[in-house]
Every structure is written in C-alpha cells, then in structure tokens.
Amino acid sequence: MPSEQAIFDNIDQYTAEDLVKYIREGLTSYERLCNPSNTYGQFSAEKRKQVLDIMQNSDEPDWNAACLANTVEAYQTYLNDHQDGRHRDEARKRKQLALAEQANAELQQAQQQAYGESEQAWALVDKNSKDALKQYADNYPKSPFADEARNILRQIQLDEFMGVGIEALKKRIKDIETDKRVMQKEITIVNLILDEVDRKHITKDDFLEALKQDHNIVNSGVIRSLFEKNFITLDDFALIGIDRAFVEAMLRHDMPQQFQVPIPISSINRESTEIYFWGIPSSGKSCALGAILSVADNGRVALSMSKDNTCQGYGYMIRLATLFNDDGNIGVLPEGTSIYSTYEMGFNLHSHDKYVHPITCIDLAGELVRCMYKYDAHEDLTQEEAAALQTLTDVMVNNRSGNRKLHFFVIEYGADDRMYEGLAQRQYLDAALQYINRTKIFQRDTDGIYLLISKVDKAKLHGAELQAELRRYITERYQGFYNGVLNICKQNQINGGEVGIVPFSLGEVCFQDYCRFNANAATAVVRLILDRTGRKKTGMFSSIINVFRR
C-alpha cells in the first residue's frame, strides 16, 4: 500500500478508481486530495469530478457486488466504503448471517476432520481388548464410535462375569428354549451360535464337539439353518458320528405330529384305573406317554389294545400310539402339546392270560406344576392358567371318581439346571407337592406313585448301576420333593411305603426331533401298568377282579 505522501506525489499517475479505493481504505481523504498544498495542483478538476461521481453513485453497484459475494468480508467492505449507504442495516444483518454460516462451516469441517481421525483410530482398535476399548472411549468421548466402544466393553465385562465358552452357550440355549417371551426361538439360537463364534467365544470345532457329545443340544430347525448358512457341512456330520439317517430326516424337513387343543374335561366317568402323567413343559412327558401307548398297542406285551372312542382325548391317543415303531427306522417326535391342555385317553388292555385291564391315562397340562406354584405364591394367574388348574381341581377334588389311581411324575435326567420362567424344575415340583399335600389328592385311592426319569441314556449306565445313579440323582437334586413324596407313600401305604423310580429312554434321539425307537423302557412301563392296574376276566359272567400289589 502506498503512503499518503506517495499518493500526493504521484496523484497524476492514479486513476479515479484507484483514488476512490485509497480513500475508502482510509489512506487519505477527498478533502486532503483537493488541498493544492498537498498535491501541488496536480489533482485536476476533471479527475476530482470523476472521483466524486464514483463516491456518490457507487452505493447500488457495491451493494449488489457484496450480495453476490455473500461473505463477511464483502459486507464489511460495503460498510467501510459507504458510511452513509442506503443498505447499511441490511449489510449488518447479512454480515451476522454470513458469520454464523462461516462458523457452522468451520465447525462441520472440524467435526469431519475429527470424525476422520476417530474413524481411523476406531479401525485400529482391538475390539476384544478391554484396555484398547476404554482408551478409545476416553480419547474420543464425542466420537460416534465411543458408544459402540463402551457397549462392547460392557458386553466383554458381562461375559467375563457370566462366563463364556461352550458350556455357557449350552445353558443360554436351554434358557431360550424355555423362555416364553422369546417368540422366534430357532432364529434366536442360530444368531446366538454364529455371534459367539464371530466374537471368538467358541470355535466351530467347539460346537461340533459339543454336538458330538450330545446330539440334542439344539433341534433340527437350528441344525438346518446352520447347514443352509454353510456353518455345518455334510462332512462335519460324518466326522462327529451322526447317523446318515438322522441327517436325511433333517434335510427332508420331516415334520412332527400336531395336536388340536382338546375340549376341557371336568371328571373321569369311565370305570378304570386312572393313570396320571405329571411333568413341566419340555420334560418329555408326552413323548414318554406316546412310547408307552405305542408298546401297549403293538401286541407284544399286551395281546391287544381296545381304544374308547368316546373319551375326550381319543384322537390324541390315536396319534400318539402310532408315533413309535420298533423297526429301526427314524421317526419324528411329536410336537409339544398345549401347555394348558389336559387329555383323557381311555382303553382296555387285553393281557395274554385273558384278562382285561380298563385303563384311563390322563396327560396333565404341562403348565399345571407352575400354576400350583403361582396359586400358592399368590401370583396372578392368566385365564389359561386358571382354566388348567380348574381342570385338575374338578377331576381330582370336586368330581373325583372312585377309581383306583397311579401317578407318574416325569423328570428329565440332567435338566436340573434348566430354568423355566425364572425357576428350575425342582422349585416347581416342590411347589406342586405343597399343593398336592394341601388338597390331599394322593391320600385316597392311590396305589402307586412313580418318578419316571426320562432321557437316562445321558447317564451312560445300565442295570443296577443305572438304578443306583438315578436314586442318587433324585435324592440329591430333588431331595425335598423326593422326601415329600416318600412321606406320602409311607403315611398312606402306597407302593409299600416306597417311591418307585423308573428309568426311561426313547432310544436314540437326534436333533431333539428324530428318534430311532428302542422299546425296552416303554415295555417295562407297560408291564408295570399291567401289574398294578385292576383287571377282569373276559366273558359274559365275569366279575371285576381288582389286583393291587402294595
């Protein structure tokens, strides 16, 4: 920039526009340029007129130029150049807006720069390291990845507290299977398995080894999804020793029997021995009953089985009795029945010694033991729960028949750690016993109480060793329930004061849904039933002969 004296000395060399610029920049003034003593008379009248004309008539052009530029600097130039300009107020407003926009742009630029830095840093973070995750969250607290870092850190800490690995995974799978709040159980379990592998909590080999040890840790739907996602291959099934026939059933998507919800019953009106089957949902109760009915119907233990088509559960009985065939082929286990439904199945067993055993099997609703707990705990019952409990009360208290009765409690071996609605099987059985004691439903006309322990093949024992293991298992894991039932038997001379423990297995079960049936256990139960139920001699004039061995 020239000095004012330089402008004076060289005024004849500057254009009128140059001089206006210097005036507006404050280097000099129009009045000082017009003083002859400063410019030595070199500021001509013509140039004076040009400078004055520019200064007086440039307001609009300069304002338009400022608006076109729309910058803080342009509006400030207008304000500086036009002390009395017509657009000064508007210039100040637009300057403030431009300042705000400039500040916002600078902030966005800074944020983008920070995001880029935090994104690069996040890409380098070891997502399995607590220290690395914490350091990132501390260094970039406002980063969009900071919350993700904290969430991953929290999950790692939770996993450490709750435990990780294949055993923890198996427990979580069991919890999902029994949690009524989880609607899409198979999808949830598949995603859990894949996520655990992805997070390196387990490996694929860990899962395959667990499946090798227990072919039933997940059902066929989960296995099929894992196969479709290429997590498991056909070679994998062969390597871990799963029979090809089970794999073929899974790939064919063989479907289980489905059962209709029955009409509620309020009494048992058939003259017969009543046999009640108790058990929480997923205990294997319906499968055990199906196997028993199948053996009763196959003509090997009993000569024949005549089904009563007037009983409420006739269709259910027919379907159950046809499920299991001891022919070496793979069968499909039945779909779980409604946990609120109780089925009545009446039939006559014709024994080889020409006696007829009138029997009514009652498959009690799986939800009953939980209903008993909720009732005594003064918890609210749903409409379905109240109806299920009312059916039991009607049949066994209000409208109780004069028939003799047997009771089988189905308890799954090895399922003592499985949680159902927040409580284990043991707590529900203990609560059911309290209800039974209070209502005294076992203290009349009961000839036998048995604990039927399902899935005993898990114990990998046989004969006397298996019996000893089951008694140890029950007395240790279900001690309160066992002692309570034992006390009922002693007080009422049931089973000679003893609790019967009956081992039970369907045979080889795979993927929870498929079975190569072995009839040995069911055959033993049918023989027990023939031994403990009332009978009559066949023939027109025969009278009923009740045979009970106490």
Image (cartoon, rainbow, N blue to C red):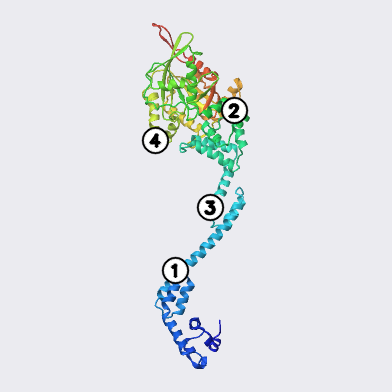
Residue 97: mark = 1
Spatial separation of the CA atoms under disc 1 and disc 4: 63 Å
Q: Which residue is mark 4?
A: 382
**Mark closer to the chain start, 2 or 3:** 3
The quadrant the N terminus occupies is bottom right
- Give the alpha-carbon distance from disc 1 to disc 2, as whole Å: 74 Å
From the image, state whether disc 3 or disc 1 is nearer to you: 1
Q: Return the mark for residue 242.
A: 2
User: Dot 1: within a 10 Å radius of its alpha carbon, few (fewer than 14), some, or many (20 or more) residues?
Assistant: some
Q: Could one spot residue 30 in this view of the protein? A: yes
Residue type pointed to by label 2: Ile
Say which residue label 3 marks: 147
Mark 3 and mark 1 in contact? Answer it, CB < 8 Å.
Answer: no
Query: Residue visible at 45% across and 84% down?
Result: 50
| Viewer-side label of 2, 3 | 2
Q: Please, what is the three-letter code of the amino acid marked with disc 4? A: Thr
Residue 515: assigned label: none
Q: Residues within 10 Å of mark 3 (few under 14, many from 20)?
A: few
Contact (Cβ within 8 Å) of mark 2 with mark 4: no
Say few, some or many: other residues with alpha carbon within 10 Å of mark 2 (under 14 / 14 to 19 / 20 or more).
some
